[in-house]
Amino acid sequence: MQQPGLNERYDIAVIGSGFAGSLMAMIAQRLGLRVVLLERGRHPRVVIGESSTPLSNLLLEELATRYNLPNVKPLSKWGSWQESHPELACGLKRGFSFFHHDGSRQAGAIRRGNQLLVAANPHDAIADIHWYRADFDAFLASEAQGLGVAYLDELDLEGFAEDEHEARLSGERRGQSVKITAQFVVDATGPRGFLHQALKLGERPLPGYPATQALYSHFRGAGRLDDLGGVAFDDKPPYPVDDAAVHHVFDGGWVWVLRFNNGITSAGIAATDSLAEQAKFADRARAWEQILEKIPVLREQFADAEAVQPFRHIQRLGFRSETMSGRRWAMLPSAAGFVNPLLSTGFPMTLLGVARLAEILVHDWNTEGFATQLTNYAVKTDAELLATARLIGALYENLGDFPVFTALTLLYFAAASYSETVRRLGKSQLASSFLLHDHPLFGPQCAHLLDRARSLRNGADSERLIEEIFLAIEPIDVAGLGKRERRNWYPVEAEDLLRAAHKVSASRDEVVQMLERCGFNPITLQA
């Protein structure tokens, strides 16, 4: 483990040792650069953002392979994680579970008409993971040090200055002055983080996205919906509904429930300002209890649960920095902006940003094209943030209308499953942007549909929008999302992808080979 002095010079300084900052530092170190990783706090620590997705895990796997990070690669799948790092807590994620509540405090189990179950994988071995960030982030920070990255924690950075040759960081650590000089600085400190504050950067609005707040904690003793009879099944669901990112949605907000294998359950609510003020989020634990009282299923699930962390209240979720890169610095997407944890969009956006910055270091470091590529990076980051805000804003507008809400989610799931598939086939050029926002056909169609979704006037408008959404996703639907007969339960079936091979410019044999490489059940493939 390399311990830096208090006055050092580096090629790259990464500020923030969360998962993204540590990955960025490891990659830069692998590229032969001299790297320092700077941290204000100390691991382990609890932060918001815990639910990964198939695209996130694929990007993590790609980065680990591309930059020779063998200890990180197993963390991209549940099965390999359990084999390689069982000491790191995490949660099994088989899909996305949505349950709608109409606000009437309805008793009884949640029936099929108020359910949306979207499987992300066919079995546990290749399932996704909820990242227990206290363990996950600490592990990656330790890995970075093991690769030779210099590391300073408990560092209170105060100043930033730059000229045409270098950037200079100054601060204090345990009563001693610290000065760090680097050719380039990467900010991974999160929304309204270090560089945003130090450079006094402005904020820009997120058009179409409402002001929202969050309240959350970690709990012990939370029950399972399937044990409590909280969900009614008229058939076998595509996966155990609790082994998922569970969303309870209602007009004005939604509650998440994520289970880890260490007995901890992460839960919280993200709501519009009006609902947050009505529920008095500032009262924290008392506000949480009020929310549970309005949703009987959740009240029963958390009846014996105890918060093991202080409730945290985030008064403003949405953020978009006016500037995202400079001559000697760049923000990772997680520092450049944030929308909302609904649909777990933050991880894939951030990992795409890590991959793009890494490629810039590979191809443009110390070249005249470096500044141009940084500008392009910032433009892409901002465009993807705006596309995400447009999607989440439309979903918030329709939290009380479950058929419309469900249809709108299919825009996300269609784009995400298509992107994952083409990347696994080695055709990433077919999905170069998050949510396919720059796709020549789907991108404009999706933007138009999302804009319309924020101003629906009546039931006829809603029905027309739903029909047009199904038409829009058809050319990129590789997961059978357009099959109405599934009644909002979407399993992962190989045949859906095999029949859609032409949509990803592949043959049926190419798709079979891809599925086998990914660990898809061969018996299913032969069925």
Image (cartoon, rainbow, N blue to C red):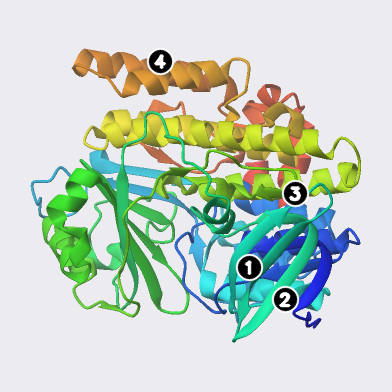
Q: Which residue is drawn at 69% across and 43% down?
A: 326
Mark 3 highlights which residue? 328
Q: In this view, does 115 lie above or below 474?
A: below
Local crowd size for mark 2, using a 10 Å CA cut-off: few (<14), some (14–19), many (≥20): many
Relative placement, left or right, of 113 versus 21 is left
Q: Is residue 237 above or below residue 160?
A: above
Q: Residue at x 81, y 73 (%)?
A: 8
In this orientation, which residue lies closer to the viewer: 212 or 56?
212
Measured from the top left, where is residue 59 in percent x and y?
Answer: 69, 49
Q: Report if the CB atoms under discs 4 and 2 are less than 8 Å apart.
A: no
Mark 2 highlights which residue? 151
Q: Distance between the residues labelled 1 and 4?
A: 43 Å
Measured from the top left, where is residue 335 in percent x and y?
Answer: 56, 51
Q: Which residue is drawn at 28% across and 68% down?
A: 227
Please report whichever mark, 2 or 1, sits nearer to the chain's N-terminal start: 1
Q: Distance between the residues labelled 2 and 3?
A: 20 Å
Mark 4 highlights which residue? 468
Q: Quadrant of the C terminus?
A: top right
Q: Report if the CB atoms under discs 2 and 1 are less than 8 Å apart.
A: yes
Please report whichever mark, 1 or 4, sits nearer to the chain's N-terminal start: 1
Mark 1 highlights which residue? 17
Q: Report if the CB atoms under discs 3 and 4 are less than 8 Å apart.
A: no
Q: Which residue is drawn at 56% across and 56% down?
A: 198
Relative placement, left or right, of 313 versus 165 is left
